[in-house]
Image (spheres, rainbow, N blue to C red):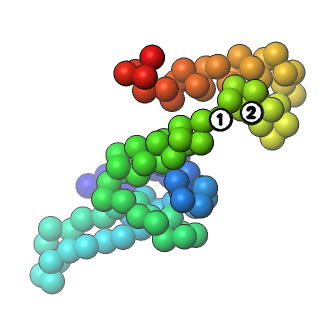
Amino acid sequence: MTSTPKADLLPCPFCGSTNIDPEGWVAQNPDGSDRQTGPACDDCVASAQSVEQWNTRALKSLLLAQPTREMLAHLIATETDAVINYAHALEIADAIIKLYTPKDAT
């Protein structure tokens, strides 16, 4: 079984932490067979059955917050190390919104 890199896990949908362990929980039969793992937040101990479930829940949490493009642009322009003007930050925000908007919502 291959492990999931931390970079593939979205932040915790409950506390926002990026401190997510891809194999945060482990379950197996007493004889050691049928080992299963799933992601868990190291800060608030939220967990999910799979990486796919974790990322879907985290994405839904982000989309429910409904950040505006202006909110995203402000974060991009002020919270990154790159020097980005506001017009460019708006373009990046539009790309992020397009990327994370479900296909059936358009």
Q: Is residue 80 in view from this perspective?
A: no
How crowded pointer 1 is (Cα within 10 Å; few <14, some 14-19, many 20+) is rated as few
Determine whether, in the image, residue 80 is placed left or right of residue 98. Answer: right
**Mark 1 residue type:** Pro
Residue situated furthest bottom in the rendering: 30
Q: Where 85 sits versus 76, above or below?
A: above
Q: Is residue 102 in view from this perspective?
A: yes
Q: Which residue is mark 1?
A: 67
Residue 53 numbered tag: none
Secondary structure of the residue carrying numbered label 2: helix
Q: Residue at x 82, y 16 (%)?
A: 87
Q: Residue at x 20, y 74 (%)?
A: 28
Q: Residue at x 61, y 55 (%)?
A: 16
Q: Residue 31: x percent and y percent? A: 12, 81
Exactly how many numbered labels are in the figure? 2
Q: Where 93 sits versus 67, above or below?
A: above
Q: Where 44 sits versus 16, above or below?
A: below
**Mark 2 residue type:** Met
Residue 71 numbered tag: 2
Q: Residue at x 31, y 71 (%)?
A: 26
Secondary structure of the residue carrying numbered label 1: loop
Q: Residue 48: x percent and y percent? A: 36, 59
How crowded pointer 2 is (Cα within 10 Å; few <14, some 14-19, many 20+) is rated as few
Mark 1 to mark 2 CA distance (whole Å) = 6 Å
Q: Where 67 sits versus 47, above or below?
A: above
Q: On the image, which quarter does residue 35 sit in? A: bottom left
The C terminus lies in quadrant: top left
Q: In front: 8, or 71? A: 71
Determine whether, in the image, residue 39 is placed left or right of residue 63. Answer: left
Q: Are marks 1 and 2 in contact (CB under 8 Å)?
A: yes
Q: Residue 19: x percent and y percent? A: 58, 61
